[in-house]
Image: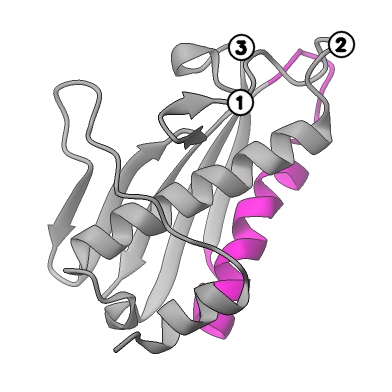
């Protein structure tokens, strides 16, 4: 039987993918005490990146980046579900998100880009989805992706 969070995901029209395997020598998540720390997730969908580049380069818009941040959040939830043995109802709160946005030097709306992920966490977990956060601009990210987001969750 689906839990409360699974039902909420269904209401939002979100189907979580299988949690992606790490691409190098690191763990996809670490559980220490009552915290789950999830390694940075990139906006892979069906094993592919939809877009690459940097925000403000003439091809990647802020809207594109926000859509990519939402995909990162969905991948965070997929890893979290794996860490919780398939039961997202074990999550007590979203503690922190950290977002990196590949962007041109004159682009300064990284917080608005990462809001797409923050908003999804609030939509899924309600008040428990409110969290601490950082959002920074970087010159490049793995595989040329536009956004990478890490997370910390209390279970």
Label 1: few (<14), some or many (≥20) within 10 Å?
Answer: few
Q: Secondary structure at mark 1?
A: loop
Considering the whole magenta stretch, tell me its main secondary structure. Answer: helix
- The tally of labels here is 3
Residue 138 coordinates in the image, percent (x, y): 60, 19
**Rendered residue at 40%/59% (across/down):** 77
Residue 100 coordinates in the image, percent (x, y): 56, 32
Mark 1 or mark 3: whose residue is earlier in sequence: 1
Q: Nearer the viewer, mark 1 or mark 3?
A: 1
Calculate the distance from the C-alpha at mark 1 to the C-alpha at mark 2: 16 Å
Q: Is residue 145 left or right of residue 30?
A: right
**Rendered residue at 52%/73% (across/down):** 9
Label 2: few (<14), some or many (≥20) within 10 Å?
Answer: few
For label 1, the residue is 50
Magenta range: 103-131
Q: Nearer the viewer, mark 2 or mark 3?
A: 2
For label 2, the residue is 58
Label 3: few (<14), some or many (≥20) within 10 Å?
Answer: some
Q: Secondary structure at mark 3?
A: loop
**Quarter assignment of residue 67:** top right
Residue 132 is covered by the magenta coloring = no
For label 3, the residue is 139
Indicate whether 18 appears above or below 11.
above
**Rendered residue at 61%/24% (across/down):** 146
The quarter of the image holding the C terminus is bottom left
Q: Is residue 20 left or right of residue 107?
A: left
Mark 1 or mark 2: whose residue is earlier in sequence: 1
Q: Is residue 36 left or right of residue 107?
A: left
């Amino acid at each position: 039987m689906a839990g409360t969070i699974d039902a909420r995901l269904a209401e939002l029209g979100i189907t979580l993918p299988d949690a992606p395997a790490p691409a190098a020598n690191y763990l996809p998540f670490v559980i220490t005490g009552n915290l789950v720390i999830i390694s940075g997730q990139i906006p892979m969908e069906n094993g592919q990146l939809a877009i690459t580049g940097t925000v403000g380069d003439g091809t990647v818009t802020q809207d594109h980046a926000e859509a990519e941040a939402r995909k990162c959040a969905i991948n965070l939830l997929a890893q979290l579900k794996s860490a919780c043995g398939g039961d997202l109802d074990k999550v007590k709160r979203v503690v922190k998100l950290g977002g990196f946005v590949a962007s041109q030097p004159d682009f300064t709306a990284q917080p608005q880009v990462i809001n797409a992920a923050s908003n999804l966490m609030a939509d899924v977990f309600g008040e428990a989805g409110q969290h601490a956060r950082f959002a920074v601009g970087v010159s490049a990210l793995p595989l040329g992706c536009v956004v990478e987001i890490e997370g910390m969750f209390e279970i």
